[in-house]
Image (spheres, rainbow, N blue to C red):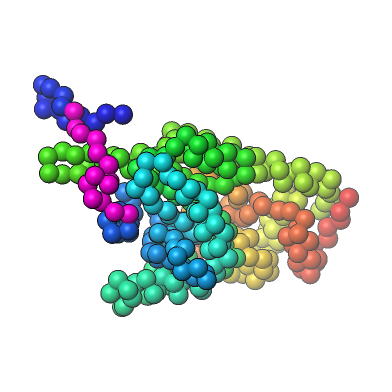
Amino acid sequence: MALYSFDGINFSAIEKTNFTKEAIYERQHIQSALAKKIEVILDDVIIISEEFSEWVDSQRRIDLLAIDKDANLVVIELKRTDTGELMELQAIRYAAMVSTLTFKRTVEIYQVYLNRKGLVDENAEQKILEFLSWDEPQEDSFAINTKIVLVSNDFSKEFTTSVMWLNNSYGMDIKCLRLVPYKHGNQTLIDVQQIIPLPEAESYQIKIRQQSEERKVARESSKDYTQYVFEGASYSKRKLVFAVVSKWVELNKPQSIQELEKVFSMNKLFVPIQKAKDTYQRQGIYRHFLEENEIFKFPNGELYALSNQWGSENIEKFLKLASLIGLEITAT
């Protein structure tokens, strides 16, 4: 699409150019500039490393490695070409390589990055915890997914077709952004365009992908029709958990979330209500009970939501906890 300047009377075309013609290089210019101002292409991420490499082949380096607000790792790859070449395959390989990073190791990587930037007084762990709004490290909630962001002057049709197929058929989270340079006097202007997924369709596509994942899980567990009887009523897994926790709260009237978590000692069972709502806003799916009458309220004013994500593995642990506190549940 053409770009114009407008003086109130006339439109004047602004010359489209390319990074090669303007002697703008990937690492020296684009990567360095984006590391300083990543919000040009992405909101709500922090850069934790540049030219990241922890494998035998030192030629393989992730241009930018980041973390998003959901504690996911984000692999960012840059090209100044107009085809994208094979960067999607390269990025997938890199994403697989970093997918096993722990919170502790990520803190170490970020601290090295801060030190290289001359920010030796900055505490990497504290900065990450503040960014994620965590009070303490949560290894089980960290790097559950690895996202990919590809940035180039342009992408070929074969490239975009491949990426859309990977996103739609295999549930990958790959975003493509086009940086188009224009020459205006002695200035180089950059038009930033997100082309996959289209911004106006991104929220919808996220919901579709999540629905597909839920259906897949449902199909894989379709033989499990287990119902649970608690105090004369029959429940599915998720409704059972809410009923049991609600009953215990009714009987014991805990004064704080710590009292509740001491009894139901399962990771990620309860989260602050705002965090649960933020999760819904970002992911478009309810992962917690969020109706007004489903929120757990404490005398100190704290509000917490209960997870509604229950499968055959974690429900067994919950049943054991319920048994230990004297709540009788029967599977049918």
Q: Is residue 260 visible?
A: no
Q: How many labels sit on residues?
A: 0
Q: Residue furthest top?
A: 9
Q: Is residue 260 left or right of residue 142?
A: right
Provide residue 90's location: percent of width, then percent of height: 50, 54
* Depth order, front residue of 87/319: 87
Q: Is residue 305 magenta?
A: no
Of residue 132 and residue 27, the one placed in the foreground of this image is: 27
Residue 25 at what x, y percent from top left? 29, 54
Q: Is residue 55 above or below residue 202?
A: below
Position of 239 relative to 58 (above/below): above
- Magenta stretch prevailing secondary structure: loop
Pick out the residue farthest to the bottom: 121
Quadrant including the N terminus: top left
Judge whether 289 appears above or below 67 on screen.
above
Extent of the magenta region: 13-26
Residue drawn at x 76%, y 59% is 313
Q: Is residue 15 magenta?
A: yes
Q: Where is residue 176, by image quadrant?
A: top left
Locate residue 198 relative to residue 285 in the image: left or right.
left
Residue 220: give x, y in percent of width and height. Answer: 77, 46
Q: Position of residue 12 (x, y in %)?
A: 15, 27
**Residue drawn 46% across and 56% down?**
75
Which residue is found at the position 45% from the left and 45% from the top?
85
| Residue 56 visible, this angle | yes
